Image (cartoon, rainbow, N blue to C red):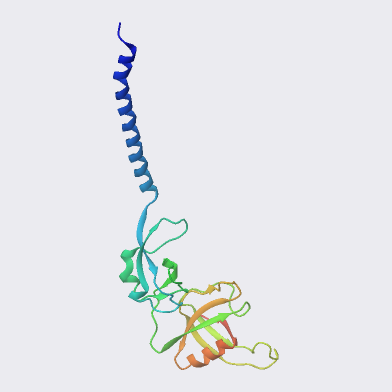
Amino acid sequence: MANPSTSGGRRRPTWIAAGVLAICLGGLGGGFLYSQAVHTEEVLAITERVSRGEVIEAEDLRVVPAGELPGVDSVPASQRDSVIGTRAATDLPRGSLLTPDSLSETEPRPGMVQVGLRLTPGRTPTQLLPAGTAVTLIIVAAPGSDPTATTSGSFPGTTAIDARPSEDGSAVLVDVWVTAEHGPTVAELAATDRLALITAEQS
């Protein structure tokens, strides 16, 4: 009669080896699945703050690894050369990932200057205007002044970048191109909150 302990002892190493192999294969399979789920790629990020309307230079960009973020459309590092020379469509904080929506490919026009406006509700259309929209800037009474006071004057312009709401939602931010002659006056009126914006009549 065979010795049970001896027979079991002969079979035990085989089962142990099979168990170890299964664990190793499971670990390799899990690692493969994890690497597929957590996919990373090199994308562009901002090294120093870039204000909206400013040209993005080579030194403003760096390459960082990033995973897939739901709802975030990043710019691949391979597009770095095409990004250089474009303008920021919004304020880009230091360390933020670059997105296609944060870029404006619209080029400055000869004889025009770019002026930033912060317009409160009632002084701009409720629909946010895209870049390239023809607009008219109208002089309005200064805040706190007699609302019946006569004001006059307007300036033609074109939106330089897409209009966007301010961070606190209390105003609309938009950059416009006006003639170099009108630039200083428009900037002064904008600084004292004396401008309203309407879309220009299309010819």
> In this orientation, which residue lies closer to the viewer: 153 or 1?
1
- Front-lying residue, 43 or 139: 43
- All told, the count of numbered labels is 0
Q: In the image, 101: left or right of 195?
A: left
Image x and y of residue 56, in percent: 38, 76
Q: Position of residue 140 (x, y in %)?
A: 62, 88
The residue that appears at 57% across and 92% down in the rendered structure is 153
Q: Is residue 170 above or below residue 150?
A: above
Instruction: Name the residue rendered at 61%, 92% in the picture.
Output: 152
Q: Is residue 186 above or below residue 102?
A: below
Q: Nearer the viewer, residue 199 or 53?
A: 53
How far across and down, in percent of the image, does residue 139 sit? Answer: 59, 89
Q: Quadrant of residue 33?
A: top left
Q: Quadrant of the N terminus?
A: top left
Residue 203 shows in the view: no
- Kindly identify the residue that appears in the image at 33 percent across and 64 percent down: 77
Q: Residue at x 34, y 29 (%)?
A: 19
Relative to 137, 59 lies left or right: left
From the top left corner, tell me how far across and down residue 74 is, in percent.
41, 62
Judge whether 48 appears above or below 30 on screen: below
* 176 vs 14, nearest the viewer: 14
Q: Is residue 178 visible?
A: yes
